[in-house]
Image (cartoon, helix red, strand yellow):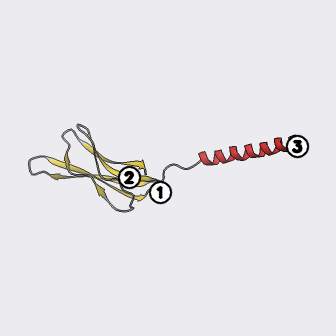
Amino acid sequence: MKSRLSKFTTGIVAAMLLGGGLVATATPASATNCNDYRSSQSSGLGYNEYRARATCSQIDGNRKVRAALIRSGGPDYYSQYFTRLNVSYYTGWYSCYAGCNSGYQVANV
């Protein structure tokens, strides 16, 4: 009788663990809702300078975000990481001789 009970108990525990594992792996993707924008201004020296802006209306509690100025012909530039909602964060002003775009990066806190 004892061996039947422990096999039954082991089966229930294994089913509970397996079921719990399935629930744990079915978590939704990151719920981050952000917008990015690239703006430009004249440098006064005959070329334009650019910066990127990022604003988020939703960020997962375990995530942080930063604005990115993605340059085609040079290094990318970033703002500080942020977690505040509905506040705009900016990169500095940089030249983009070969072109550039705005974007944002999401990272774990």
Q: CA distance from mark 1 to mark 2?
A: 11 Å
Query: First in sequence: mark 2 or mark 3?
Result: 3
Q: Could you tell me which secondary element the residue under label 3 belongs to?
A: helix
Q: Nearer the viewer, mark 2 or mark 3?
A: 3
For mark 3, does the 10 Å Cα neighbourhood hold few (<14), some (14 to 19), or many (20 or more) residues? few
Kindly indicate whether the residue at mark 2 contacts the one at mark 1 (C-beta within 8 angstroms).
Answer: no
Q: Could you tell me which secondary element the residue under label 1 belongs to?
A: loop
Q: Could you tell me which secondary element the residue under label 2 belongs to?
A: strand
Question: What amino acid does circle 2 point to?
Answer: Val
Kindly indicate whether the residue at mark 3 contacts the one at mark 2 (C-beta within 8 angstroms).
Answer: no
Is 7 left or right of 51, judged from the image as shown?
right
Disc 2: which residue: 65
Q: Position of residue 53 (x, y in %)?
A: 29, 54
Question: What amino acid does circle 1 point to?
Answer: Gly
Disc 1: which residue: 61
Disc 3: which residue: 2
Question: What residue sits 36% from the left and 56% below the top?
Answer: 82
Q: Position of residue 50 (x, y in %)?
A: 21, 49
Q: Position of residue 20 (x, y in %)?
A: 66, 48
